[in-house]
Image (cartoon, rainbow, N blue to C red):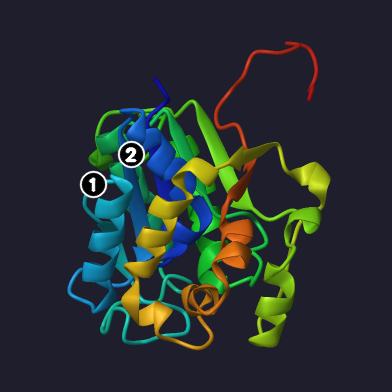
Amino acid sequence: MLPSLLAVFAHPDDESLLAGGVLAQHAAAGARTAVVTATWAPDSRRAPELADALAVLGAGTPRLLGYNDARNPEAAPGRPRLVDASLDEAVGHLVAHLRDFKPDVVIGHDAVGQLTGHPDHVRTHQITLLAVEAAGLAHLHPEAGLPWQPAALYAATHPESGVGLLGPLLEGAGKAVLAVPDSYVTTSVDVTSWADVKWRAILAHRGEVAGERPLPGILARLPEADRNQIIQTEHFTRLTPGPTKGNPAQLSV
């Protein structure tokens, strides 16, 4: 049995693009999976698309924190942007989901903000780091439920050697390409067996598929072979939360 898995990403479609393969893999093995999305309101136009994508991946129903997108005010009108919101408040909301779902493994964005450096990606990474640690400590956010400490935290990422076709495509759309050194990657998962499921989940984000600049739209215009080459491997960095046993007298790696 694979471990239970909770993904925490900034926007609807991040979960499918960055971890759709491992979410589908874990669900197919009978593991519990779920997704927390930091931005967009439950009554927004993208919420039904997210629900459809999660149904394809076997990841339950959307868990939306409901903050506004840094670049799109229609995401959650009247709500603060994620990048402007109280950090402690946002961490507390995520802690509640962690303690409710009780995942063995948490995955989220990397520190550079996932290739394009979107500020919501960076902020979600920061919130996830703090929340995974806080979730295991009873004195932090006691209103959010009983403590639960995930066994591992992973950041979805892109190594320099693995950008491949994606780099020129993003640059052509005027986007940044912030890959990380290969040494930063600890785990690369071949998700070829779940690529069809992953692609169906990406396609569920219909508004993004129809756009010129969003990555789902860029991928939809590619030949199938090129698209499969891009989506068939998912890369992660293990960021172990909480204390681990080691030399009690010194810091160690």
Q: Position of residue 129 (x, y in %)?
A: 54, 46
Left or right of 42 on screen, residue 91: right
Question: Crowding near pointer 1: few (<14 within 10 Å), some, many (20+)?
Answer: some
Left or right of 238 on screen, residue 9: left
Whole-angstrom CA distance, mark 1 to mark 2, is: 7 Å
Residue 33's tag is 2
- Quarter of the picture holding the C terminus: top right
Q: Identify the mark nearer the N-term, 1 or 2.
A: 2
Element class at badge 1? loop
Q: Residue furthest left?
A: 43
Where is 211 relative to 194, above or below?
Answer: below
Where is 136 relative to 127, above or below?
Answer: above
Res. 185 image quadrant: top right
Res. 246 image quadrant: top right
Residue receiving disc 1:
60
Q: Where is residue 75 in the image (x, y as percent from the top left)?
A: 32, 80
- Quarter of the picture holding the N terminus: top left
Instruction: Tell me the kind of residue under disc 1.
Output: Gly
Left or right of 47 on screen, residue 5: right
